[in-house]
Image: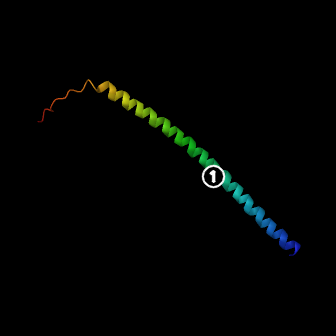
Amino acid sequence: MENNELESRLTQVEIKLAYLEDFLTKLQTIAVEQGNYIDALLKESKTVHNKVQEILENQEGDIPNIRPPHY
């Protein structure tokens, strides 16, 4: 192979590597953001679940078991 051909191939490999490194960095950033978002959603879901449980526990004795007036 000629020296120019080797240089050209090496340049192409370096270009592809640079694109792959950039892609990997962006992908990692997105994965971290999504992980943080999932953690926040799980925390919020747990808070809502606890609040619903608290409301249900407080209302168990307050709801009479009688027929509605339209019956």
Instruction: Answer with the quarter of the image where residue 49 lies.
Output: top left
Image position of 22 with respect to 71: above or below: below
Q: Residue furthest left?
A: 71
Left or right relative to 39: residue 61: left
Left or right relative to 60: residue 46: right
Q: Circle 1 sits on which residue?
A: 27
The type of residue carrying mark 1 is Leu
Locate residue 27, reporting x and y percent: 63, 52
Point 34% across, 28% down: residue = 55
Locate residue 39, reporting x and y percent: 53, 39
| Dot 1 alpha-carbon crowd within 10 angstroms: few under 14, some 14 to 19, many 20 or more | few
Q: How is the image coloured?
A: rainbow
Q: What quarter of the picture does the N terminus occupy?
A: bottom right
Point 67% across, 56% down: residue = 23
Left or right relative to 48: residue 35: right
Point 71% across, 55% down: residue = 21
Point 70% across, 58% down: residue = 20
Q: Residue furthest right?
A: 3
Image position of 55 with respect to 31: above or below: above
